[in-house]
Amino acid sequence: MEKLFKLQEKGTTVSREIFAGLTTFLTMAYILAVNPDMLSKVDGMPWGGVFTATAIAAAVATIMMALTANLPIALAPGMGLNAFFTFTVCMGMRISWQLALTAVFVEGLIFILLSLFNVREAIVKAIPPSLKKAVAVGIGLFIAYIGMKNAGFLHFISDINILPDAFSFTNDAGVTTYPGQVLPGADIVPEIVVFNQSGQILALIGLAIIFVLHVLKVPGAILIGIFAATLIGIPMGITTVPDTFSIVKAPDAPLLFQFDFNTETLISFKFIVVIFTFLFVDIFDTVGTLVGVTTKAGLVDGKGGIPRVKQAFLSDAVGTAVGAALGTSTVTSYVESAAGVSAGGRTGLTSLTTGILFLIALFFSDVFLLIPSVATAPALMFVGFLMISPVMSIDFNDPVEGIPAFMAIIMMPFTYSIAEGIVWGILAYVLLKFVTKKAKDVSMITWFLFAVFVARFFLH
């Protein structure tokens, strides 16, 4: 154990590392309820199969992180990325879930190559820091917005009349409606939300529990809040316990190799945009988490470098490819790993413990299946809170930096698309740098992205 994880060198012990791993698991195990709940909204993706895929993919990637990178960082299918998979790619762009999984799998393979040749680090350096932070904030707002809708906190009249992402509609009069706009003749009027429904009340209770436990620094506040709301929902008639319920049961089969390798589809512009968006978002999710958690743990070197960063990148790349083959969305490093670091975790033994706990959780799927959407909705809102903190370090006093960040942040929840936020952020950044005669500050890679996104409008 000492030879593998260098515990004495890092000033830690076996018991401390195991406790830290348990803390990390309790903090992020909500994904076992939230991810299947979100992906199963796509017609044809069964809850049980996604649950199995989620647990195994998290275990594989986290254990690989432990054994190759020796870092106290856990991985699982990413929040935000699963929302993009469900709401933008499958529901908005009308791409089948099989093709969406194919995009995730291809992304994983590309990530493996990029990691081996250190390209991911180069891409990260080329993207403006303000936009990296804005992406995290925008995803946080997007996730919180989804949580509020699931909780019944938001209602709109004629919601059905909003055109889905990536579609346009031209009526007989030649009037064209673009993604996110209201179809001609439709009125959207926000309803006044009255908190008198049992689902809304349960969501408020769950949210209050999570807030209080978090403030009191109780490990696993999110998971405890979800389970508490689920139990409270039984007498309220919201949580339904099936006759066949069992605490321990064999896991359902994952959605093994459900890919669509249709050549014509694979080379389409739409498919390429989906892959790029998965790549872009995952790059910054992983990098941001690695930098934040390793800094908090005191593991960065004198130049701010992350130890064994190539192995860390490979862990999430392999996890993504394995996850897609099993039937789940992109795997990424989790910021909740900071909870384990706060509990004393300093080595891969922390993440090894977390990975093993994900494997054990495979046999408790019925427990997670009980959880209703209104019980997981508070978790989504709270994760939004956790992701919004980078907004404080964005320089909004400098409009050249602040406006692109604002566009990226605001477009994600309002267009119901992470991709749109990224597109508008980069477009605004390059344009403002150009008109202020600071074009030399824009990297060639960023210019390339700008050209691709401009072309997108003409090829729509």
Image (cartoon, helix red, strand yellow):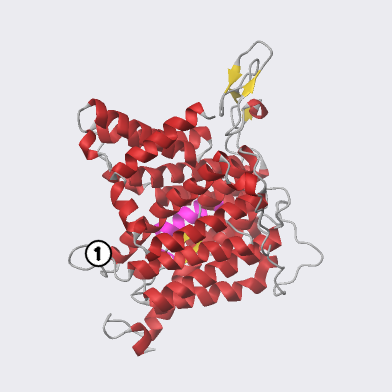
Image quarter for residue 219? Answer: bottom left
Q: Which residue is mark 1?
A: 305
Tell me if residue 28 comes above or below residue 72 in the rendering.
above
Q: Residue at x 36, y 40 (%)?
A: 448
Count the marks. Answer: 1
Q: Position of residue 65 (x, y in %)?
A: 43, 72
Q: Which corner quadrant holds the C terminus?
A: top right
Q: Position of residue 396 (x, y in %)?
A: 26, 35
Q: Residue furthest right?
A: 243
Q: Residue furthest top?
A: 173
Q: Amino acid at mark 1?
A: Gly
- The answer to whether 417 appears left or right of 387 in the picture is right
Tell me if I can see residue 333 in this picture.
no
Q: Residue at x 32, y 59 (%)?
A: 292
| Towards the viewer: 65 or 210 | 65
- Secondary element type, mark 1: loop
Tell me if residue 40 comes above or below residue 62 in the rendering.
above
Tell me if residue 112 comes above or below residue 44 in the rendering.
below
Q: Is residue 208 magenta?
A: yes
Q: Position of residue 158 (x, y in %)?
A: 66, 25
Q: Which corner quadrant holds the N terminus?
A: bottom left
Q: Residue at x 70, y 62 (%)?
A: 48
- Please give the range of residues in magenta: 205-219
Tell me if I can see residue 366 in this picture.
yes
Image quarter for residue 199? Answer: top right
Image quarter for residue 441? Answer: top left
Q: Position of residue 322 (x, y in %)?
A: 56, 66
Q: Is residue 246 magenta?
A: no
Q: Chief secondary structure of the magenta span?
A: helix
- The answer to whether 24 appears left or right of 345 in the picture is right
